């Protein structure tokens, strides 16, 4: 898994401001490093000197039984909130509580799961020029269990709550929300503008292009507009009215579809207590009891810097690597000439 960088500084402070930039650069570089290495076979040096917290798949604190590498008792927690509602912070919190969680930000790293969605939903929608919606196809959720995950956060999994509830009736659902729809859209709009540029210029990398399929499908879903599937770059901007209508309709449908006993409507600013209570974590085991701060990650500012570093960082590293390779080759040629 990629390394996850947290900003635990106080809100509104200069330390938070620089912490967001710091974490954004580190995470963006980590993502693009993975894509470049997988596509080219090159080994790109990691950024050094950055304090980090791993996104865990360690089962030592796992709340689910593991049999032959697979979680035996089904999915435990599904985040059903749209992206930009605190889903990444919540994913880190669930990891801390012993629920190995797959967030969309790391979907591409889990190739069996990602390929299943690309082949059957994302790319197929583009080929057909028709959005394959959740009611048209049910993914193989056992792939999540085979991957060692007990929980998911963010889209696309947030859209499949009805199928998941039928297959795993004991699963619990968390609807993450923002203060209001306007606040959500501003953050969503920042994210979409940040990720479209790297996707546009990174299409020469096959793994990035697969992410491009997901992005096009996702924008089509959120904006209720299939134009995004095959539109040329630059992609059309987000439609504020359509996106907000989609966000609100989704939230309302979740509220009416999932029994209240299995649904928590939650703002990550509420911290550990309601989360531990809902997931039946004993008070003695709840991180708040031990003074552990609730994770804070992926702010809008950090996401913007992720986009910058995901493009500029690997380019600078690649240029440095090329320059060093040329120097070595030149040195080798000179030595060969002397021997002659």
Image (cartoon, rainbow, N blue to C red):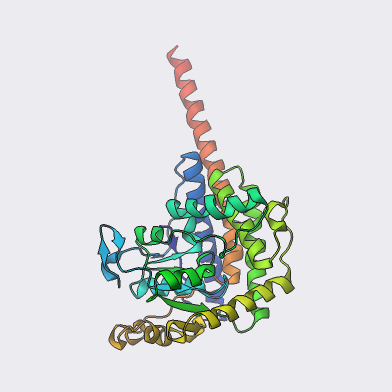
- Does residue 199 show up? yes
Of residues 140 and 81, the one drawn nearer to the viewer in this rendering: 140
Q: Position of residue 246 (x, y in %)?
A: 65, 73
Q: Position of residue 11 (x, y in %)?
A: 54, 81
Q: Position of residue 93 (x, y in %)?
A: 41, 75
- Does residue 212 show up? no
Relative to 120, residue 284 above or below? below
Q: Position of residue 26 (x, y in %)?
A: 50, 60
The picture quadrant where one finds residue 227 is bottom right
Relative to 52, residue 313 above or below? above
Relative to 89, residue 331 above or below? above
Of residues 302 and 321, the one drawn nearer to the viewer in this rendering: 302
Of residues 280 and 123, the one drawn nearer to the viewer in this rendering: 123
Q: Is residue 254 left or right of residue 243?
A: left
Of residues 174 and 58, the one drawn nearer to the viewer in this rendering: 174
Q: Is residue 225 left or right of residue 24?
A: right
Q: Which residue is drawn at 53% across and 31% down?
A: 326
Relative to 313, residue 60 above or below? below
Q: In this view, does 278 lie to the left or right of 201?
A: left
């Amino acid at each position: 898994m990629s390394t996850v960088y947290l900003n635990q500084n106080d809100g509104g402070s200069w330390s938070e401001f620089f912490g967001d930039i710091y974490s954004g650069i580190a995470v963006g570089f980590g993502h693009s490093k993975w894509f470049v290495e997988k596509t080219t076979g090159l080994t790109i040096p990691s950024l050094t000197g950055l304090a980090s917290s791993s996104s865990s798949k360690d089962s030592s604190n796992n709340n689910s039984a593991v049999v032959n590498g697979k979680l035996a008792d089904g999915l435990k927690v599904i985040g059903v909130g749209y992206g930009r509602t605190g889903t990444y912070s919540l994913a880190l919190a669930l990891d801390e509580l012993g629920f190995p969680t797959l967030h969309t930000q790391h979907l591409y790293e889990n190739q069996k799961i990602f390929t299943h969605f690309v082949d059957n939903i994302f790319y197929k929608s583009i080929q057909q020029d028709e959005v394959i919606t959740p009611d048209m196809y049910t993914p193989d959720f056992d792939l999540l269990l085979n991957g060692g995950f007990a929980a998911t956060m963010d889209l696309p999994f947030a859209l499949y709550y009805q199928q998941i509830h039928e297959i795993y009736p004991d699963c619990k659902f968390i609807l993450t929300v923002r203060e209001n729809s306007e606040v959500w859209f501003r953050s969503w709009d920042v994210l979409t503008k940040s990720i479209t540029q790297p996707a546009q210029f990174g299409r020469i990398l096959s793994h990035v292009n697969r992410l491009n399929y997901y992005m096009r499908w996702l924008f089509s879903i959120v904006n209720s507009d299939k134009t995004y599937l095959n539109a040329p770059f630059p992609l059309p901007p987000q439609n504020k009215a359509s996106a907000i209508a989609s966000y609100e309709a989704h939230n309302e449908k979740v509220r009416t579809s999932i029994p209240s006993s299995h649904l928590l409507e939650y703002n990550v600013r509420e911290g550990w207590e309601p989360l531990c209570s809902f997931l039946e974590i004993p008070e003695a085991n709840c991180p708040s009891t031990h003074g552990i701060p609730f994770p804070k990650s992926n702010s809008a500012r950090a996401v913007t810097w992720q986009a910058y570093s995901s493009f500029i960082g690997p380019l600078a590293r690649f240029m440095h690597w090329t320059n060093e390779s040329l120097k070595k080759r030149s040195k080798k040629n000179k030595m060969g000439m002397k021997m002659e």
